[in-house]
Amino acid sequence: MKKNIVLIGFMGTGKTTVSRKLSEMLDIKEIDVDAYIVEREQKSINDIFKEQGEEGFRDIETASLDEIKNEKGIISCGGGAVLRDKNVEILKTNGKIVLLTATPQTIYERVKDDDSRPLLKGNMNVDHIKMLMDRRKDRYIEVADVVIETDNKDVDEIAAEIIEYMGNNS
Ligand code: S3P
């Protein structure tokens, strides 16, 4: 594979699970940007949002993407990473951007018991997820090289679709 696989998409679309699977199947390194940020800052994502706000977190995210830009592998991004043009530019240099999608209902089912996402804190419901998703939808589509739907698919099917795409396009 010549290009990195860059996984993007809304929270709960399965980026972390799929990147782990791809990493095992292809025997290539996985770089989870949120995990990199937690390690770099020695703080949880919740604490970073609490102390520095969303903009502070976004600045750390951009700096982190810049630091890992020469890595080779599967890059699993946080759901908001592609909102900034600079980040997309970095990610596109070495990678193909694979957008994972799911309906708000599916996302709700996947994330409802997890309190690690500051943007859903106190607002863990389908309507709020749909509202946030509607704001981002066009942006996700605009930056994606390929769109993979994840509703009603297991991780093996999703990984196989991505590998097929990369085989034909990278
Ligand atoms: C965010 C998504 C999160 C994390 C942060 C902000 C977002 O990552 O980066 O909470 O803006 O959508 P996941 O998509 O891995 O949950």
Image (cartoon, grey):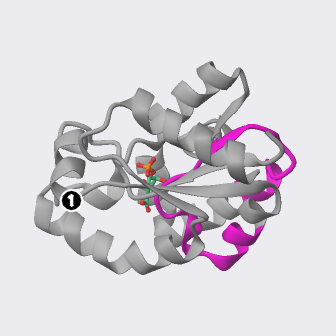
Q: Position of residue 106 (x, y in %)?
A: 20, 48
Work out whether 78 lies above or below 114.
below
Q: Nearer the viewer, residue 74 or 120?
A: 74
Q: Which residue is drawn at the image coordinates 47% and 43% (left, top)?
A: 15
The residue sitting at the front extreme is 168
Q: Which residue is drawn at the image coordinates 22% and 74% (left, top)?
A: 131
For residue 59, side relative to residue 79 (left or right)? right
Q: Residues within 10 Å of mark 1 (few under 14, many from 20)?
A: many
Q: Nearer the viewer, residue 118 or 94?
A: 94
For residue 100, side relative to residue 1 (left or right)? left
Q: Position of residue 40 (x, y in %)?
A: 68, 41
Work out whether 114 lies above or below 46.
above
For residue 14, side relative to residue 89 (left or right)? left
Q: Quadrant of ligand 1?
A: bottom left
Mark 1: which amino acid? Pro
The image quarter in which residue 33 lies: top right
The residue stretch that appears in magenta: 63-89
The image quarter in which residue 71 lies: top right
The image quarter in which residue 34 lies: top right
Q: Which residue is drawn at the image coordinates 63% and 26% (left, top)?
A: 23
In the rendered image, which residue does mark 1 sit on? 104
Q: Position of residue 162 (x, y in %)?
A: 56, 43
